[in-house]
Every structure is written in C-alpha cells, then in structure tokens.
Image (tube, grey):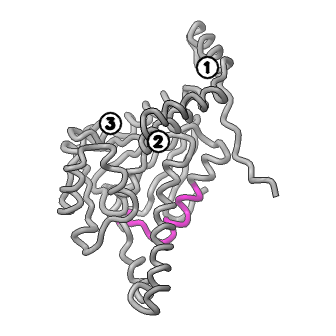
Amino acid sequence: MADSFLDVQIDAGIATVSLNRPEKRNALNLDFWYSFPEIIRDIDNNSRARVIILKAQGSVFSAGMDLSIFMNCGNKLIQGEPGRRSENLRRTVKQLQAAINVLEECRIPVLGAIQGGCIGGAFNLVSACDCLYTTNDAYFSLKETQLGMTADLGALQRLPYKMPEALVRELAFTGRKFPASEALQAGLLNAVVQDKQQLMTHVHQIAKQIAANSPLAVTGSKEMLNYARDHSVIDSLNYMATWQSGMFQPGEMMKAFQANSNNQPADYDELWPVEPPLS
C-alpha cells in the first residue's frame, strides 16, 4: 500500500498516509494521482483502519501540482481536433477530481495535518478532508489564478461550505497567501499548534478518540454530514430517518454502556470489507 511518493503506516486503527517527496516540496506528480486513490480505497474497502491521517514529510505540506504533468501533456492541450481535444481534457480533469473525491467517499474520517505551504492542487486536496489541523507557519493558496487558470479540483466547490463565501472568492480571485491564523478565524481549521511535533501529537489524540468509537456510528455521522451539505434540511432529515431505520443497532449502544460502566474501551466490530459486486 505504498509507492515511492506515498508512505502508509497503520497502527491501532489509525492509518497515516504521508506525502514523502520533500526534496520536491511534495509536488503532486503523475504517480500520486494514480496511487493515492488506490491507497485510500484499499484502506477503506478492506476496513484496515477507522480513521486516516493525511500528512507530509519535510517543511512544506505540498507545492501543489507537479509542473512536469503540464509539460508531459502540453501537446494534448493545444494540438489536435478541438472537439476531441476538449473532450479529452474534460475527462482528464474529472479523473483528477475523482482522485480527491475518494477522501469524501471513503467511510472513515480523514484528518489533514499541514505544515508550511499548502498550495494549488494541495489546497484542493485537503479541502476534501473532514478536519484540518496546522502549524503556525502553515498557509494556503489557490495559486492557480496567478498561473492563468481556474482551480478545478474541488476547492471552489467545497470551501464555501467551510468558511465565508466572500473570503473564498477573494482567495480565488487573488491567489494570495492565506495564513493559518486567518484560516482558523474563518472556520476552516480545527486547531493551530506551534510546531510539527505538537501537530502530530494533537492529531493523533483526535484520531485515537475517533478510533475508540463505534465505526458504524462514525461512518453514519460522516454520511449524514456530507448528505446534509448537498441537500435541504427536510431531505436530510428524511434520509437520516431511513438510515437510522436500517443502521441503528442497540448492540452497539450496549457495548458502549458496558464499556463505560467498566471504565474500559468498547470492543466494536470493524465495518465489513467492501466486496466486489456479483458477476
């Protein structure tokens, strides 16, 4: 479950996925866009963990999209029959979007731990995390605007649900640096800490609390929150009632009550692995 760029460690129900290309400021190369969704799906589909931490090695979280990708596909962007060229580009963008969408689609929470710069494609990436934590020196930037393009991998669609839309518009129009202190005040971040060591200690504490809860209750919470974001209150309540009618299990509550009375962790079953559809 790892490649030359991505390192994966799983312990006590916590999967830590690390960007491991610090000499290139963790720029997101072509291998990342193929490997990352496969790794996240593998963790989720095979119930390998109850929570994922997304982090990066080095002093910078990620400089964003590796420019070599644009160089390698440059001819496809400017040459060829216009209709087919446009259709190919649309399909490519959707493939890149899908590699980020897996963070929302997976059944378990994803916690982003960010230090230094989180730029362009990387900002799009972490916008799909459930919770974000940073060091004091962290900053974000929708750098795409300054490079002559529109951010197209999800930040413009997700960020208005996480902080004021007027601020998102300003960040998109200017491409300016968005420091952690401002991001915390705007509501994008859960916490800002002093340094990387404190960051990982804090995020692991949150992850341990999540992993100690019923996986079924946690995945239900994530499913309901994502659904409510995209639907009306009434539709979301109706979906909640339908979900609860099938997923509510008194046995989970009994395990919680018994564990609390004995002052010990509850022994919950894992979510079942996702089996391939019948052929």
Q: Quadrant of residue 72?
A: bottom left
Q: Is residue 111 above or below residue 64?
A: above
The residue furthest front is 234
Q: Along the polypeptide, which appears first: circle 2 or circle 1? A: 2
Q: Does the segment drawn in magenta span residue 120?
A: no
Q: Position of residue 77 (x, y in %)?
A: 41, 84
Q: Is residue 237 above or below residue 259?
A: below
Residue toward you, 35 or 198: 35
Prevailing secondary structure of the magenta residues: helix
Q: Along the polypeptide, which appears first: circle 3 or circle 1? A: 3
The answer to whether 113 appears left or right of 252 in the picture is: left
- The label on residue 176 is none
Q: Badge 1, how many Cα within 10 Å: few under 14, some, many 20+? A: some
Q: Which residue is mark 2?
A: 226
Residue toward you, 142 or 86: 86
Span of residues in magenta: 25-39
Spatial CA span between label 3 and label 1: 26 Å
Please give the name of the residue rendered at 49% of the width and 50% of the height, measured from the top-left corner.
103
Q: Secondary structure at mark 2?
A: helix
Q: Which residue is mark 3?
A: 190
Spatial CA span between label 2 and label 1: 27 Å
